[in-house]
Image (cartoon, helix red, strand yellow):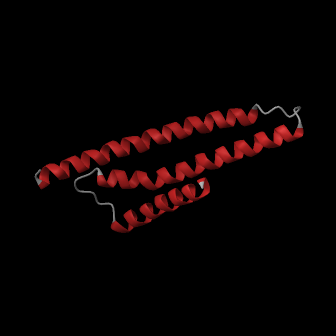
Amino acid sequence: MSDERMNRLSIWSCRWWALYVLLQFYHLAQEQSLLTRRRRDIRLDDDVEVVQKQKRQLKAEGDRIFQDTLINVGYLPLTLHWSLENSSFPEIGVGVFGTLASAFELSKAWKAT
C-alpha cells in the first residue's frame, strides 16, 4: 500500500472517529436529560434508606456522564485536527487535549477496578 493511500485512509479513519465523538456528545446529553428526569421523580415518601440508595446511584451516574463528557472534550479537538490534511492546531494543543483525555480515561478505568 502506498504512503499516499495510507495517509488518506488514516485521515478518513479520524473523520469517522470525530463523528463518533460528536454522536457521543449527543448520547451523553440524552443520558443527562434522562438522569435529570429520574432525579426529579425520586419519591421522598419512600423509605429513607431506599431514597438514599437511589440518590447515591444517581450521583454515581451523573459523575460518570460528567467524566465521559470530559473525555470527549479531550478527544474532539484531536479528532478534528487529525481529520484535516493541513491543520493549524498547535502541537501543544495536541499534548494538552491528549493528556486531558487520557487522564480521565485512566481515572475512569481506575475507579472501575
Would you place residue 56 above or below residue 81 in this image?
A: above
Instruction: Determine whether, in the image, residue 55 is placed left or right of residue 71.
Output: right
- The quarter holding residue 43 reads top right
Q: Position of residue 88 (x, y in %)?
A: 29, 60
- Give the residue at the far bottom of this rendering: 92
Instruction: Determine whether, in the image, residue 19 is placed left or right of residue 62.
Output: left
Residue at horizontal 12 percent and vertical 50 percent from the top: 1
Quadrant where the C terminus sits is bottom right
Q: Position of residue 36 (x, y in %)?
A: 68, 37
Count of numbered circles on the image = 0
Would you place residue 75 above or below residue 22 in this image?
A: below
Residue at horizontal 64 percent and vertical 49 percent from the top: 63
Residue at horizontal 50 percent and vertical 53 percent from the top: 71
Q: Position of residue 64 (x, y in %)?
A: 60, 48
- Give the residue at the far left of this rendering: 2
Instruction: Determine whether, in the image, residue 95 is placed left or right of residue 10.
Output: right
Residue at horizontal 57 percent and vertical 52 percent from the top: 67
Would you place residue 87 above or below residue 12 in this image?
A: below
Q: Position of residue 51 (x, y in %)?
A: 82, 38
